[in-house]
């Protein structure tokens, strides 16, 4: 005696869906790419953060920011040292960012750039201290922030005015705000700025490019 019952179409569809779903579930997940080093004009630049994470930081008017900084012969770095908690990682962020900028100007631009540090210790009254290399100490600056040499890289952490994690250019086109809502975000924003100056492009990174000479 033959058993000739037909399997209903809807049951075939259910079985097919289950098999397909189980195949998808068993697919190995792609591991996120971790990249901390890129090359520019023969120089390797190493970052503490994953470069792919840094490139996610919003940067407004990046082309104009890059134009301003890359044509400059001097850069002013402004920060507020009123927060003891921030001062420790401000030192690290400054060291990492300025070191890479100096290498970029030396090896890619073939020029020396003068970096001047300002501590805006009284924001309300626009009072600044300038670091004087000749005496290796801070001195009162006779000018306010609007009168110092630009471009100005204004660093803001969570305790000194940062209300978001971003790199932005102010309306005057002179001040570049680099800010983060916690230490990691602050560090990522500084890396985002540096990567833009080095000419790093996210689309090219995704294609596997690592040398941006």
Image (cartoon, helix red, strand yellow):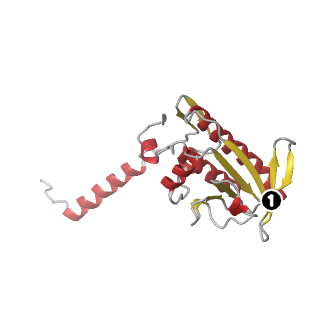
In the image, taking residue 171 as reference, residue 205 lies left or right, namely left
> Where in the figure is residue 105, as x and y percent of width and height?
60, 37
Examine the image and state in which quarter residue 7 appears.
bottom left
Task: Name the secondary structure under disc 1.
Answer: loop
Residue sitting farthest toward the bottom: 124
In the image, taking residue 45 as reference, residue 98 lies left or right, namely right
In the image, taking residue 199 as reference, residue 149 lies left or right, namely right
Residue drawn at (44%, 38%), measured in percent from left and top? 208
Residue drawn at (41%, 46%), measured in percent from left and top? 27
The foreground one among 143 and 157 is 143
> Where in the figure is residue 132, as x and y percent of width and height?
82, 46
Examine the image and state in which quarter residue 183 appears.
bottom right
Residue 4 visible in the shown view: yes
Residue drawn at (71%, 66%), measured in percent from left and top? 161
Name the residue beneath numbered marker 1.
Answer: 142
In the rendered image, the vertical position of residue 70 relative to residue 171, given as above or below:
above
> Where in the figure is residue 130, as x and y percent of width and height?
80, 53
Graded by Cα atoms within 10 Å as few (under 14), some (14 to 19) or many (20 or more), the crowding at tag 1 reads few
In the rendered image, the vertical position of residue 18 relative to residue 98, given as above or below:
below
Residue drawn at (55%, 41%), measured in percent from left and top? 34
Residue 182 visible in the shown view: no
Residue sitting farthest toward the top: 42
Count of picture labels: 1
> Where in the figure is residue 141, as x and y percent of width and height?
81, 57
């Amino acid at each position: 005696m033959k058993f000739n019952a037909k399997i209903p179409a809807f049951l075939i569809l259910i079985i097919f869906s289950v098999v397909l779903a189980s195949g998808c579930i068993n697919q190995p997940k792609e591991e996120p790419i971790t990249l901390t080093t890129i090359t520019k004009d023969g120089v390797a630049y190493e970052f503490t953060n994953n470069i792919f994470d840094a490139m996610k930081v919003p940067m407004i008017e990046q082309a104009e920011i890059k134009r301003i900084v890359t044509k400059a012969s001097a850069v002013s770095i402004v920060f507020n040292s009123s927060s003891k908690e921030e001062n420790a990682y401000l030192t690290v962020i400054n060291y990492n960012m300025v070191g890479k900028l100096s290498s970029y100007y030396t090896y890619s631009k073939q020029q020396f750039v003068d970096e001047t540090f300002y501590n805006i210790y009284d924001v309300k009254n626009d009072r600044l201290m300038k670091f004087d290399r000749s005496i290796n100490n801070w001195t009162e600056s006779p000018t306010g922030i609007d009168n110092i040499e630009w471009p100005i890289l204004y660093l803001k952490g969570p305790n000194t005015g940062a209300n978001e994690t971003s790199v932005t250019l102010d309306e005057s086109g002179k001040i570049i705000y680099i800010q983060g809502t916690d230490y990691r975000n602050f560090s990522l924003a500084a890396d985002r700025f540096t990567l833009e100056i080095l000419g790093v492009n996210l689309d090219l990174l995704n294609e596997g490019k690592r040398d941006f000479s």
